[in-house]
Image: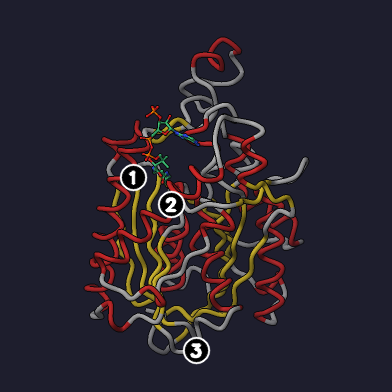
Amino acid sequence: MKGVRFLATGSGLPAKVLTNADLCKIVDTSDEWITERTGIKERRIAGPGEATSDLSARAARIALDRAGLRADQLDAIVVATCTPDHLFPSTACLVQKALGVPHTIAFDVSAACSGFVYGLAVVNGLIATGAAKTVLLIGADTLSRFTDWTDRGTCVLFGDGAGALIMTATDGPSDLLSVALSADGGKGDILKIPGGGSRHPLAKPEEAVSFPPVIKMEGKEVFKHAVTRMIEASLSALERAGRTPGDLTLLIPHQANLRIIDAVAKRVNIPDERVFRNVSKFGNMSAATTIVALDQALSEGRVKSGDLVELIAFGAGLTWGAAVLRWS
Ligand SMILES: CC(C)(COP(=O)(O)OP(=O)(O)OC[C@H]1O[C@@H](n2cnc3c(N)ncnc32)[C@H](O)[C@@H]1OP(=O)(O)O)[C@@H](O)C(=O)NCCC(=O)NCCS
């Protein structure tokens, strides 16, 4: 079985910044409330005509450039997203087209905010079995298109973005030390987009009124589960890797809310300086969150060759997971 070697990362972030002050003009809220309850100060919002595949392709080109690879050297493109450009073709196929590659494996992974960590397990399988040698994994979401901009309980939380990671097969030890995943579909109703799928299709206008294609969330419930499950996932992935929190150079928790990040870091018992936080600048970018954070941490020199990093994710489904990796 082949192991995984990490080559390079990249980010694709929209130019438009939406600040808390901007949100105060849209809904009844305040910078003070948003900052105190979430830690978010601003987020990026996709521009007109900019969709998930556009952000994805931008992140991919940067990662390819840093890896010193041409797109035609990829064997597979996997996009983790819950906000695809279309129900089909997959966003991965659109990225393949944008990169001008004629033939690769290409498909999407749907696990909402946990999608990138789920994607790591999927890519590990592709590489281990020899189905693909060099793989582009993207975490990307454009939740602003599925946000109810009259609902102050949700519209302040999310941002748009994409992050890319290129991996290749190695005969040496794998740099993906462990992945721990789980889900609880029984609690799916606490965070969902009710309309727009096959149950309540938008093609029937009366359905769109009763079941709008926008995020509906029971915030307090989601908060509780996010903390519990992220702690569980983190400890489980560390155990599978045979490591302890003390071995980690950096913990990168899903950036949904600063209070969730702080609660998880405290329980996992990691000092503040080894916990990555960028939620104030980007809000919750769903599947893009952990990979954009890793890309930023690498650019800032907070992760170097040989360092151990853990990514932790939680999202709709409910889904959650964590991965321990050694940066190549
Ligand atoms: C959404 C969240 C920030 C709300 O914080 P909270 O402390 O639970 O706040 P509540 O929902 O209990 O609301 C408290 C009050 O603030 C109000 N409020 C909600 N959003 C507000 C906003 N943006 N500005 C001002 N007031 C707001 C509520 O209406 C409520 O007022 P009331 O007491 O008069 O009814 C928090 O629950 C959260 O972060 N949940 C997890 C979200 C998440 O991570 N989702 C994605 C997971 S991948």
Q: Which residue is painted at 61% across and 40% down in the image?
A: 144
Does any atom of ligand 1 lie closer than 8 Å to the CB of label 1?
yes
| Tag 1–tag 2 contact (CB < 8 Å) | yes
Left or right, 127 with reference to 208 = left
- In the image, 13 versus 100, the foreground residue is 13
**Disc 3 on helix, strand or loop?**
loop
The amino acid on which the numbered mark 2 sits, given as a three-letter code, is Asn
Q: Secondary structure at mark 1?
A: helix
In the shown orientation, is residue 107 left or right of residue 241? right
Is residue 293 in view?
yes
Residue 133, image x, y percentages: 53, 75
Point out the tag, 1 or 3, that comes first from the N-terminus.
1
Asked whether 96 or 50 is in front, the reply is: 50
Q: In the rendered structure, which amino acid carries the disc numbered 3?
A: Ser
Quadrant in the picture for residue 240 = bottom left
- Location of the N terminus by quadrant is bottom left
Reading the image, the residue beneath label 3 is 305
Name the quarter showing ligand 1.
top left
- 30 or 212: nearer the viewer: 30
Disc number for residue 223:
1
In the rendering, which numbered label is found on residue 257? Answer: 2
Q: Residue at x 45, y 51 (%)?
A: 256
Towards the viewer: 285 or 241: 285
Across and down, in percent, residue 122 comes to 43, 61
Give the amino acid at mark 1. Answer: Phe
**Label 2: element kind:** loop
Rendered location of residue 30, percent (x, y): 55, 39
Sequence-wise first label, 1 or 2: 1
Label 1 Cα crowd, 10 Å radius (few <14 / some 14-19 / many 20+):
some
- Compared with 11, 216 (above or below) is above
